Amino acid sequence: MATFLEMKFGIEIVQQPKKGRMTGFSDDNRPLAPSLILQLKCNQEISECDTTQLICTVDCHLLEPASRISTDRMGMDKFKALRTENNIIGNRVSSCHRLEDLSGKVGFYFYYPDLGIRSPGKYEFEISLLNIGLDTGTSKILYTIQSPPFKVVSPKGYSGPPGNSRLSKCFVSQGADSRLK
């Protein structure tokens, strides 16, 4: 049996937004839908005890502004700065949750029900799995992935949320945090 430090971990994106409405810079927080859900993968059997020192963090990167005209007007230097600007709102850190999927199979998941993006454009998430339980008082990145791109549009271009997914509803019924409406 491998020790925790010998285990190899990974993350699988189980669900992610495809298109969302920008939140802007007001208090009008409109979470992306469906919610981002990640599943922990491991080369060994893992217990709930093994997951207490694991967290996932999410950041976003602007791949392309909403219009080519805006890129031309602002210039590439400003676009590069905007690409790394903090455009994401909501809880960007999740601890690991033991939950059953739609078929009743137990897994370990990271769940982000309230992520929103402030400006329109094409984005990707950068997701990192960290071990925060090291004896040295530091954390260690175990795995990092990029999500497939998704679009965030202005209120005029948004046709409404797609509704809550069956998986999100399943997790909420088991006590996962929810911003479902």
Image: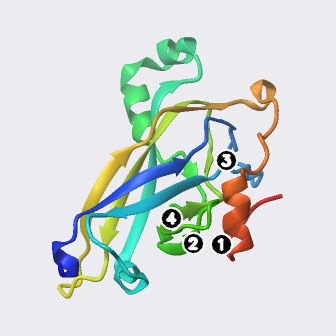
Q: Position of residue 75 (x, y in %)?
A: 42, 18
What is the three-letter code of the residue carrying label 2? Leu
How far apart in space, not on screen, are marks 4 and 3 (Cα)?
14 Å
How far apart in space, not on screen, are marks 4 and 2 (Cα)?
10 Å
Residue at screen point 46% across, 38% down: 124
What is the three-letter code of the residue carrying label 4? Phe
Q: Which residue is mark 1?
A: 176
Q: Which residue is mark 4?
A: 110
How far apart in space, not on screen, are marks 1 and 4 (Cα)?
10 Å
How far apart in space, not on screen, are marks 3 and 1 (Cα)?
15 Å
How far apart in space, not on screen, are marks 2 and 1 (Cα)?
8 Å
Q: Say whether marks 2 and 1 touch (CB < 8 Å).
A: yes
Q: Which residue is mark 3?
A: 34
The numbered mark at residue 99 is: 2
- Give the quarter of the figure containing the N terminus: bottom left
- Give the quarter of the figure containing the C terminus: bottom right
What is the three-letter code of the residue carrying label 3? Pro
